[in-house]
Amino acid sequence: MAARSATGCVAIVALNGAVLMSFNSVRTLLLAIAAIALPMLASAQTIPKEMGAARTVGLFNFLCLKHLPDLDGIERAAGFGEFDQLLNGDLVPYMPEIAHEALRGWRYHDHGEEYILTALRSRADAAVGQQMPAFAGAAGTTCSLRVPNTQPEPVLGELTRVMGRAADKTWQEGATRVYSWTHQQPDALSFVHYYVPESKGAKAVIEASVYLNK
């Protein structure tokens, strides 16, 4: 799996738990994020009030893309929405298999439907390293939004529209269809993934990922 971290993703540089970012690294990271986020920001500055694919993708933009790689920014957005924070045992279902430095999660309801927001900071896993050896072990931050799987085709269509192109890759992972958009620069690797389970009762996952190669 190209960039999935069991929750979702965008990256920063860290050493011994402390964040270290040079001016050039910050600039590279911002450019990488902009390549993903700007189309979304341009089309979803105002989140539609009506339930639908545009609102779902707009929420993903507001909660994830607008704030990545700032975990505190994501937390502030969750606080703005008065989401319920997931603590201790409530986080277990979203715990990644890979080692991680931080994991935060929240639950909220919109138009009667449950959504789960998670943010993760970790190193690139083996799958990313195999696909992109230059980014093996790169530091990353992931933001994922688990959404109702009631309208996968309209959500895919909205993601395709705001990304400006069809998914670069698509593949099957068991009972889940994965759509992936990639952007790469010499020092930054970015992904947007959309995971669509076959079961309508399971939640779909929209996630953004950026890895920075220091």
Image (cartoon, rainbow, N blue to C red):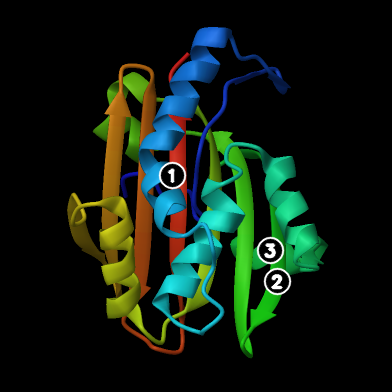
Q: Out of 132 and 168, give the one closest to the viewer.
A: 168
Whether label 2 touches label 3, CB < 8 Å: no
**143 w.r.t. 30: above or below:** below
Residue at numbered disc 2 = 107
Tell me which label, 2 or 3, sits earlier in the chain.
3
Kindly identify the residue that appears in the image at 61 percent across and 44 percent down: 67
Q: Amino acid at mark 2?
A: Arg
**Residue drawn 54% across and 45% down?**
142
Q: Residue 7 location, x and y as percent?
A: 52, 56
Rounded to the nearest angstrom, the CA distance separating label 1 from label 3 is 29 Å
Alpha-carbon span between mark 2 and mark 3: 14 Å
Q: Is residue 20 above or below residue 210?
A: above
Above or below for 210 versus 167: above
Residue 179 percent across, percent down from the top left: 27, 60
- The disc placed on residue 103 is none
x and y, in percent, of residue 43 in the image: 40, 57
Report the disc number at residue 92.
3
Asked if residue 182 shows in the view, the reply is yes
- For label 1, the residue is 37
Rendering coords of residue 159 (x, y %): 33, 62
User: At 60% across and 56% down in the image, what residue appears?
Assistant: 63
Helix, strand or loop status at disc 3: helix
Mark closer to the chain start, 1 or 3: 1
